[in-house]
Structures are given as C-alpha cells and as structure tokens.
Amino acid sequence: MPDRNGRIEQTHRRQRLCGDARPEDEADIEPDDNGDIHELHLVFNDQEYQYVKQLAEKVWEHVQKVSLPEVGEFSSDLKGTEAFEQALLDDIL
C-alpha cells in the first residue's frame, strides 16, 4: 500500500493523464527505484474524466481572473487536496 505522499502523487498523475486523454486506456512510463522503466496503464471512466475536466475549468477561471485562492487552510495530505478540489468545484474559493 502506498504511503500518503505516494497516494497524492498517484492522484495528481491520474489527473494529469486524464486531462490529456479521453476516458480510455492510457499508458504512462515511469522508472522504478532501480531505474528500470515500466509502462503503467490507467483506465479512466467517464465520471472521473468529467470530474477532472470540471476541476480544470474552475482552475482556468481563477487563472483568467488572476484570482488565486488562499490554500493555507488546507492540509498538504490527500484529505486536504480533496477538500481543496471540492471547494473549487463548489465555488467556495
């Protein structure tokens, strides 16, 4: 089981890939601790794709307005990341 930082990294990797791809199988290449290259396959369902798309649209709205939200109230762990994302989607920020 990945540690908390690993889970956050996995969440961010999935979102980056999902933002660049349609909801279908996509490959990502990553070295392991020994430097050996492995191909990782991730499958995105439509719900996950739509979530990342909405999140990207909210972020883009803030960028266009040069209205960057204060993030200090959110923890840097996975729970804080998810809370920040939800606050963006709910227009709380």
Image: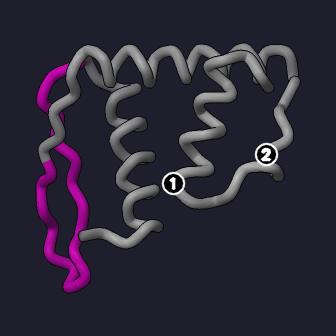
In this image, 90 relative to 71: left or right? left
Residue occupying image coordinates x 81% and y 49%? 73
Q: Image quadrant of residue 41?
A: top left
Q: Nearer the viewer, residue 89 or 66?
A: 89
Residue 36 position within the rendered picture, expressed as x and y whole percent measured from the top left: 14, 75
As drawn, the residue found furthest toward the bottom would be: 34
Residue occupying image coordinates x 82% and y 52%? 72
Residue occupying image coordinates x 30% and y 69%? 2
* Image marks 2 and 1: residues in contact by CB distance under 8 Å: no
Q: Amino acid at mark 2?
A: Val
| Display colour scheme | one colour
Query: Which class describes the residues within 10 Å of circle 2: few (<14), some (14-19), or many (20+)?
Result: few
Q: Which mark is residue 33?
A: none
Q: Amino acid at mark 1?
A: Leu
Alpha-carbon span between mark 2 and mark 1:
14 Å
Residue 19 position within the rendered picture, expressed as x and y whole percent measured from the top left: 40, 26
In this image, 3 relative to 63: left or right? left
Residue that mark 1 sits on = 78
Q: Name above or below for residue 5 compared with residue 65.
A: below
Secondary structure of the residue carrying tag 1 is helix
- Answer with mark 2 or mark 1, whichever residue precedes in sequence: 2
Secondary structure of the residue carrying tag 2 is loop
Q: Nearer the viewer, residue 51 or 19?
A: 51
In this image, 21 relative to 7: left or right? left
Q: Nearer the viewer, residue 73 or 5?
A: 73
Residue 49 position within the rendered picture, expressed as x and y whole percent measured from the top left: 33, 20
Magenta residues span: 23-40
Query: Which class describes the residues within 10 Å of circle 1: few (<14), some (14-19), or many (20+)?
Result: some
Residue that mark 2 sits on = 71
Q: Nearer the viewer, residue 79 or 25?
A: 79
Q: Name above or below for residue 44 compared with residue 46.
A: below
